[in-house]
Image: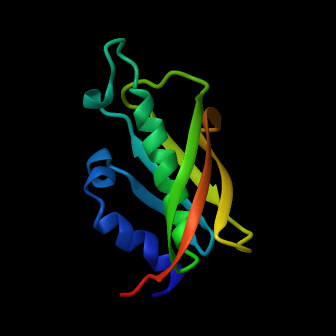
Amino acid sequence: MKGEAIPHKMLSQDAYSTWLGIEILECEIGRCKVAMTVRKEMLNSMGKAHGGISYSLADTAFGFAANTHGKYAVSIETSINHIEALEEGDYLTAESVIENVKNKLGFNIIEVKRGEELVALFKGVVYRTSKSWEE
């Protein structure tokens, strides 16, 4: 399977990311940019987006980019820094670029943005299995 097609296949089988409304904006080998809009049912008790929303968007970008190299890749450690509170209606993007594939581990930092404003910084480690993606 061609690497840039893998994230589209992943999204078609991902009920959670579909529920979030995540869409793939750009995708190529080693890079994926995704986006979504914060909805009312994603808000916490303080009327702000739950922290899991920006985390999920970044994690999806991370996973999609990691898998474009053709092998099943899974996150083994992740963390996020929430920089700005998010509101209902905010349109968010997250882009993951994983350039060097030298061994079974990959490291990446994903910026979550509202327009040009950095709202969260996600860090992740991915493990690449030996299993290949097939159509």
- Nearer to us in this view, 120 or 108: 108
Quadrant position of residue 40: top left
- Nearer to us in this view, 14 or 72: 72
4 relative to 110, above or below: below
- Which residue appears at 45% of the width and 61% of the height? 24
Image mark count: 0
Residue 90: % across, % down = 44, 32
6 relative to 43, above or below: below
74 relative to 130, above or below: above
Q: Can residue 92 be seen by looking at this rendering?
A: yes
Residue 87: % across, % down = 42, 24
* Colour setting: rainbow
Left or right for 6, reference 43: right
- Nearer to us in this view, 74 or 97: 74
Q: Quadrant of the C terminus?
A: bottom left
Q: Quadrant of the N terminus?
A: bottom left
Quadrant position of residue 42: top left
- Which residue appears at 37% of the width and 68% of the height? 10
- Nearer to us in this view, 59 or 93: 59
Residue 56: % across, % down = 43, 44
- Which residue appears at 47% of the width and 37% of the height? 54
Residue 41: % across, % down = 25, 29
Left or right for 38, reference 104: left
Q: Can residue 113 be seen by looking at this rendering?
A: no
- Which residue appears at 45% of the width and 78% of the height? 5
60 relative to 135, above or below: above
